[in-house]
Amino acid sequence: MSEPDEPPRSATRFADLARLTPARIALGRTGASLPMREVLRFGLAHAQARDAVHAPFRPEEVAAECAALGLETLMAQSAARSREDYLRRPDLGRSLSPESEAALAPRRGMFDLAIVVADGLSSTAVHQNAVPFIAALLPILQRQKLTLAPVVIAAQARVALGDEAGLALGARMVAVLIGERPGLSSPDSLGAYLTFGPRRGLTDAVRNCISNIRPGGLSFGDAAFKLAWLIDQGLRRALTGVDLKDDSDAALEAGVAPVALPER
Amino acid sequence: MGYRVAVGRQSYAFADLRELMAKATPLRSGDVLAGLAAGSMEEMMAARIALADLPLRTFLHEALVPYEIDEVTRLIVDSHDAAAFAPVATLTVGEFRDWLCSEAATTDALARLAPGITPEMAAAVSKLMRNQDLILVARKCSVVTRFRNTLGLPGRLAVRIQPNHPTDDAAGILASTIDGLSYGCGDAVIGINPASDSTARIGELLRLLDGVIARFDIPTQACILTHVTSSIALIEQGAPVDLVFQSVAGTQAANASFGVTLALLQEGLEAGRSQKRGTVGDNVMYFETGQGAALSANAHHGVDQQTLEARAYAVCRAYQPLLVNTVVGFIGPEYLYDGKQIIRAGLEDHFCGKLLGVPMGCDICYTNHAEADQDDMDTLLTLLGTAGVNFIMGVPGADDIMLNYQSTSFHDQLYIREVLGLRRAPEFEDWLRRMDIIDPTGRLSAGQGGQALLTAMQDRAA
């Protein structure tokens, strides 16, 4: 058997299997059914995930944390005016409100990358994980000598809102960091969606996605490496999406850091 | 051509077939979102009354999505089998519903009919059917497919083990897989949704599952649910690909949003078959679908989401799939708002797929932003088990820790087998008996049947 403080990589009993994954395995059974304790454990997790969907977003806190990293921020709001609106009308969540569009327009420039922090379906995920992830990403982007647009902090927002924001700011590429729909075991999962050439009418086929960024999932460091690798490759090849395969794992194992872009 | 119906003193007009179909559809949030839903309950019934009188053959010369701009329409029209359609060619949609429910519609008659049915016909008649009709008729349909075992036989239910892990950790995936096998799951497929889309990582996962299947000589198949282009690339690299996966939808534009064309799916089929890894058949494709995919991609052409979903099955049908899975509640409340809408959609999808001759399974599922819970899933599972669904998902504890949604569990499949007496795929059932995982009655063995599987973990660590 392994030492107590070292998770085992082998299992001799079914109960040991459960230590190898956060998945709900080796639960036991009573007849064909789940034991009572598991029914209750599941019910509690579901209740917490339901609550996470409706927890309020606090954009000013995200802005303050970004400022501490030396990043300038812009506040934005989607065309959805309420959570109910947001859940039933994804089209509204994909568009900037007219006021936000007007607010972003004067900041148009020549940027390699715009970062958009969006509440999505879990403001819990954004509050816990968005800024630590940016903090891990920032040094790599600086090594790549990328020019960054002000960080957009968007409320009641879906991924495609980043297309409008990126377009408004004149960014070659947009990375949307968004609260993913909360799972039972991970109400705090952050997703990162990368899109080259942001503009209206794009589909998910032109995006690359890194999912499950959180302390219990993909670590900030690993996720930052992956995203920086995709940004680097995407800018070089002028594309993102299904034609840009994520081979960052091989680069990571080979110890190859994403290299700096040529000076422009 | 327009349609007009008088109900009492009120007259309802429907500008074209698309509008008639959309307004006849049981209420769901996706059609409301698209601005296609009926404005009142009475208008919905007026549309159904008009639809019931519509000759079924109307769908052969009136395309809902134009032939010229959509390759899915071209596939449907060009591959229609007029001889198979002949027995119902003179019926209206309403008469077709009556025929389907009648004793004349036997299992054999329905199988012969399938190539003559277009997805629009299936969708139209489903809109006139109550839940019990959808169950009754689907139960008479039999769609049997084979790769390393035989799926879809009457009285059988298969289960996909879905051992997803948020970081694709091999030990974690293996642990979930072994747990699932020990509950007698895995005959449909052992299928991983990878967190990574790195071909190198996916190749490792393929070799991991291939190793488990080979080591214990399990009569089942593995699949990594990655884009068809990745599977083709992996086949070229010599990775052990059993099944080629792809998400598909019911319009060319929606498929484009998934990065696929029909030609690409054909390439995937040929690449998969070139491997010759099946032992009892060569159904090598695994497709997933779900109502709302086309609208989500802004590619719905003013057609209701349920009709477009049925069109996705016509896409699947062309590639002789082993498995077609409607991931019914995954897409979220903007398309299917609550448990009632999810349950209805699951029954419609299963019925339409089976009527079209597609090996339908269902991911009976919901997300945490939908107004649904595990009670709704129990209901849909019980209904689909009764309707003869080919396969369901087996997710540890019903909680997918990678995709963040709830599905059916290893325990849920035990429940439905216990209640309805459903058995596993025959080859897989024999294997479970040999391993002493199940007893002769099909219940989990009281002994330590799964213990041998644990050696895979020990050897892995060694």
Image: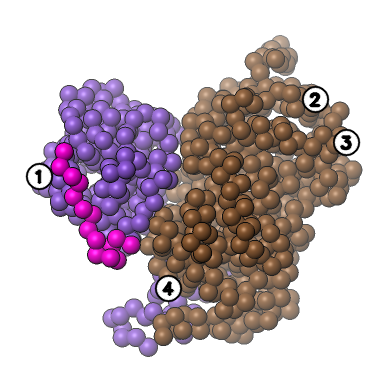
Q: Is residue B416 visible?
A: no
Going 37% across and 88% down the picture, which residue do you hit? A1
How far separated are the C-alphas under marks 3 and 4? 55 Å
Question: Is B161 within the magenta?
Answer: no
Q: Which residues are magenta?
A: A250-264
Q: What number is the disc on residue B87?
A: 3
Chain on which label 1 sits: A
Closest to the observer: B196 or B25?
B196
On residue A70, which mark appears?
Answer: 1
User: Please, is residue B437 above or below residue B21 in the view?
Assistant: below
Please give the residue where the numbered disc 2 appears in the rendered image.
B55
- Mark 4–mark 1 distance (CA, rounded to whole Å): 41 Å
User: As drawn, is A126 to the left or to the right of B442?
Assistant: left
**Amino acid of disc 3:** Pro
Q: Residue at x 37, y 32 (%)?
A: A94
Nearer the observer, B326 or B7: B326
Q: Nearer the viewer, mark 3 or mark 2?
A: 3
Q: Position of residue A66 (x, y in %)?
A: 15, 45
Q: Are marks 3 and 2 in contact (CB under 8 Å)?
A: no
Q: Residue at x 89, y 45 (%)?
A: B103
Of the chain colours in the picture, the one used for chain B is brown
- As shown in the figure, which amino acid type bears the numbered disc 1? Gly
Figure quadrant of residue B220 = bottom right
Secondary structure at badge 4 equals helix
